Image: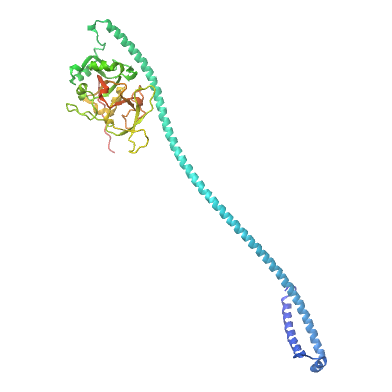
């Protein structure tokens, strides 16, 4: 209790106990039933001990006053405890309010965390999409770089070709002037002495003519006066010439000897073959020359009357798709321009491709170098330790063939030039009708056999 020690409290308890016992005794003396005793009766009862009773009462009064003071102390303590309890209660209410605020803030934080989590998920999705777009753009950029590299290579080759073509045109003009001079000299000679001015001592030409003699071509189809040698001595410079309507260029068959072949003069006059048709070269096997000169060209895989089979190439046995190509202004305006691609799917929706079976077409070229590609190896033969290549020089109807990207390599539409005078997209002519060809000559080349490659050692 406030203002007292434990000894004081113990003494107060003992005094209250004594006062209580005396109070009971006094009440038992002062009361008897409902009757109040008088002072005289009390004196009689206590027998003169009234003074002792007063002393007791005085002691009781002092004890009572002490109890009152202690009660006031207890009341003050109770009030202080009530104040403390109210303070604690107020603090408890404050804590409860604070806890509610904290819980509310926690809920807000949870909601914010959920919102941030959703934002992070969306950001991850956006990052994945951006990564996918970046990968796609990288592939497109790589593809574009490859296309640009191809275009750059194409334009470099085009520039080189135009340069070489201009040089070739200049050489061709000089050759035409020389031929014009030779023609004037021949016209000045008597008719019986006119002939093509060729070298009489060309051993290469004699070797080729000896081989042509073994082909047993009927004499009615032989025109020796149109024989011309294009070896390095007789034709030291490769050049282009132009024939037909519209004019189309072709490369002279350098390293070959052209042997003249007779044609039906009525067909030549009626169709104006030498005025309108274009010059091209068509591959032929030496064993088939006799039959084709008399019967016309035949598709790969066909069999002649003598039982000889026309060879097939690896390309003629494939299946491809034919896609239109943009025409170039320098090409034949009467022809449709195509490029071949690897076979499209069965249900292709590009709307442009057509099934293309090369075995159903005749393929020719304005340059004989096209026929020197290893793809035409089945047409080559060995003769007396030499390699022999043969081709027909033909006049092809100007409006009856189409132009195709070269297809000799495994990589279709490759960028490697076979002849610097021609682009890859103008080297190959194709048509399905043999009547569009008129054979005007046989071109034969005899070269050394290629050196055998050493066998690879086993690892």
Q: Give the residue at x 75% y 86%.
A: 23
Most foreground residue, 444 or 113: 113
In the rendered image, residue 396, in percent from the top left (x then y), is placed at: 29, 21
| Image quadrant occupied by the C terminus | top left
Residue furthest out toward the front = 270
| Image quadrant occupied by the N terminus | bottom right
Q: Is residue 239 left or right of residue 127?
A: left
Most foreground residue, 271 or 295: 271
Most foreground residue, 119 or 418: 119
Q: Give the residue at x 25% y 30%.
A: 312
Residue 257 in the image: above or below residue 26: above
Q: Is residue 297 left or right of residue 425?
A: left
Q: Is residue 207 left or right of residue 47?
A: left
State how the image is colored.
rainbow
In the rendered image, residue 317, in percent from the top left (x then y), is placed at: 27, 33
Residue 36 in the image: above or below residue 178: below
In the rendered image, residue 450, in percent from the top left (x then y), is placed at: 26, 26
**Residue 437 can be seen, yes or no:** yes
Find residue 242 and report its image quarter. Answer: top left
**Residue 453 can be seen, yes or no:** no
């Amino acid at each position: 209790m406030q203002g007292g020690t434990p000894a004081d409290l113990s003494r107060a308890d003992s005094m209250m106990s004594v006062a209580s016992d005396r109070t009971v005794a006094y009440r038992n003396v002062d009361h008897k039933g409902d009757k109040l005793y008088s002072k005289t009766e009390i004196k009689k009862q206590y027998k003169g001990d009234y003074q002792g009773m007063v002393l007791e009462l005085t002691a009781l009064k002092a004890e009572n006053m002490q109890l009152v003071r202690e009660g006031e102390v207890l009341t003050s303590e109770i009030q202080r405890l009530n104040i403390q309890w109210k303070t604690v209660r107020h603090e408890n209410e404050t804590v409860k309010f604070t806890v509610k605020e904290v819980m509310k803030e926690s809920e807000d934080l949870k909601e914010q965390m959920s919102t941030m989590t959703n934002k992070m998920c969306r950001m991850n999705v956006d990052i994945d999409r951006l990564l996918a777009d970046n990968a796609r753009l990288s592939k497109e950029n790589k593809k574009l770089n490859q296309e640009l590299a191809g275009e750059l290579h194409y334009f470099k080759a085009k520039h080189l070709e135009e340069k070489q073509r201009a040089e070739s045109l200049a050489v061709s003009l000089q050759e035409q002037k020389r031929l014009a001079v030779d023609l004037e000299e021949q016209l000045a000679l008597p008719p019986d002495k006119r002939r093509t001015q060729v070298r009489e001592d060309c051993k290469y030409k004699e070797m080729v003519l000896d081989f042509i003699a073994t082909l047993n071509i009927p004499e009615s189809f032989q025109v020796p006066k149109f024989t011309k040698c294009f070896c390095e001595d007789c034709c030291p410079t490769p050049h282009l010439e132009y024939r037909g309507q519209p004019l189309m260029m072709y490369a002279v068959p350098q390293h070959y000897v052209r042997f003249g072949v007779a044609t039906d003069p009525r067909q030549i006059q009626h169709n104006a073959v030498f005025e309108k048709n274009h010059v091209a070269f068509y591959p032929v096997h030496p064993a088939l020359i006799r039959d084709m000169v008399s019967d016309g060209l035949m598709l790969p895989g066909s069999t002649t009357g003598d039982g000889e089979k026309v060879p097939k190439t690896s390309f003629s046995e494939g299946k491809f798709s034919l896609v239109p190509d943009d025409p170039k202004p320098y090409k034949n305006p009467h022809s449709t321009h195509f490029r071949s691609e690897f076979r499209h799917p069965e249900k292709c929706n590009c709307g442009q491709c057509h099934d293309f079976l090369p075995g159903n077409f005749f393929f020719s070229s304005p340059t004989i170098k096209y026929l020197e590609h290893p793809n035409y190896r089945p047409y080559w033969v060995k003769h007396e330790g030499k390699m022999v290549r043969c081709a027909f020089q033909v006049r092809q109807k100007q409006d009856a063939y189409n132009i195709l990207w070269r297809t000799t390599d495994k990589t279709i539409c490759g960028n490697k030039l076979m002849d610097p005078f021609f682009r890859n997209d103008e080297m190959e002519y194709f048509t399905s009708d043999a009547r569009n060809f008129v054979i005007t000559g046989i071109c034969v080349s005899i070269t050394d056999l290629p050196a055998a490659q050493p066998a690879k050692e086993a690892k």
